[in-house]
Amino acid sequence: MLARTAFDLVFRNARTRAAPEPVDIGVSGGKIAAIAPKLVCEAAEVDAAGRLMLAGFVDTHIHLDKACLLGRCAHDHESVSEAIRAVAAMKRDFTVEDIHARGRKVIERAVSNGTTRMRTHVEIDPRIGLRGFQAIKALKRDYAWALDLSICAFPQEGLTNDPGTEELLVSVLRDGADLIGGCPYMDSDPDAQLEKLFDLAQEFDVDVDLHLDFDLDPSWWHLDEVCRQTERRNYQGRVAIGHATKLSALPPERFKTTAEQLAKAGVAVTVLPATDLYLMGRDATHNSPRGLTVAHRLVECGVLCSVATNNVQNPFTPFGDASLLRMANLYANAAHAAVSDFDVCLDLVTDLPARLMNLKDYGIEVGNPADLVILDTDSGVNAIAELPDILAGYKNGRRVFERTVAKLFPPDFSGNQQRI
Ligand SMILES: [Zn+2]
């Protein structure tokens, strides 16, 4: 007879993407302690009933500080620069409490949609000062029970042309910012901005995550300079570029050589479908370009990629529920992914962003934190195709949310009226 092992919690009959048959997952001290069929143990039980379990979704690019601004401005912004201008005008009035309240709404939606790790880009400049950073730092602490929040401090409106910004960036890097971002296309000297950002990254030994470009003209770009700086500083595997919509405008041959360039330099790409689809191609009168870089094709070429949320309900993107599963479904649909690509589409919001963020403890493996979500489906392919309900989530083995499956009430043929 097998000896009984003591766990705090055991998930029964869970389908994982690694095993062909359902398994049990034992949790002890907040960590995954065993994965095997029919664990003999004493523990509280959760019956996954053959449903798919994942290690939680990973959002590498979301702006909590400028989320939920619908209603504060007109929404006729038809270009990236108009959206930036609209938010720049509003953010002078942002208070720490206001940013905290709006960020909290988005975090709670993200958590209840299964996100367990998140990298948020926080604007740092003399107009907003440190208010955004202070609010996000408080959110990181307040929601540590539900998700790990990583803070990427970045100058949205320029660095070398915006006196005082560099000093503020240095102060937040000293005060707990996890990495540095940037936006070279907003700078009067983009290469000098990149040089300065990489200097700071090396000085503070942090990763780099850039807003690279936001248009469909591949005749010029800062991608070569990013790759050059990455290699020169031995930063392969520590640099990501977001949006990179110019990549969507490349013919096949140039797409391939650029993918090889990115793979060789160890520069990752984050695609932001909701924003890119909303803002790109607006000057077309018909047959509008999608402006969506095909991440799953870059992955085939060896480039590390993620799909992420970016903005929620603001001038850049008036939509949003912070659901990465919905975003992966939107991406798969808009990027012409084949059914055989759906597994990679799910990777783009789970394993690949975990690698992009250099997380060493992600995944359903013994020893990792028991960060787990249960989806009302049975495979990765169906998770993308069906957009199933996400029924429950756990952080370090503790339940953080639960959702009930919809129940249908067919007519009662006995003639009794149903009362509400
Ligand atoms: Zn962004």
Image (spheres, rainbow, N blue to C red):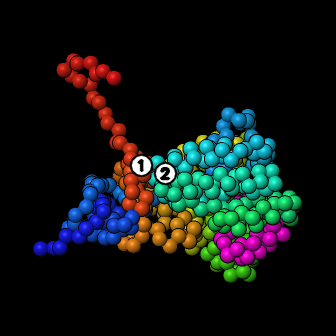
Nearest to N terminus: mark 2 or mark 1:
2
SS at circle 2: helix
**Looking at mark 2, is its residue's CB closer than 8 Å to ligand 1?**
no
- Residue 298 in view of the camera: yes
List the residue tagged with mark 1: 401
Q: Are the residues at dot 2 and dot 1 in contact (C-beta closer than 8 Å)?
A: yes
**Is residue 176 found left or right of 165 in the rendered image?**
left
**Magenta residues, as a range?**
190-215
Amino acid found under the numbered disc labelled 1: Phe
How busy is the neighbourhood of tag 1: few (under 14 within 10 Å), some, or many (20 plus)? Answer: some
Residue at image x 32%, y 36%? Answer: 407
Which of the two residues, 67 or 319, is positioned nearer the viewer here? 67
As for residue 183 lying within the magenta part, the answer is: no
Q: Position of residue 132 (x, y in %)?
A: 70, 52
Disc number placed over residue 111 in the picture, else none: 2
**Is residue 414 found left or right of 231 in the rendered image?**
left
Q: Position of residue 17 (x, y in %)?
A: 37, 64
Amino acid found under the numbered disc labelled 2: Val
**Is residue 174 found left or right of 24 in the rendered image?**
right
Q: Position of residue 258 (x, y in %)?
A: 68, 71
Q: Is residue 300 above or below residue 382?
A: below
SS at circle 1: strand
Question: Residue 257 occupies which quadrant of the picture?
Answer: bottom right
Residue at image x 31%, y 33%? Answer: 408
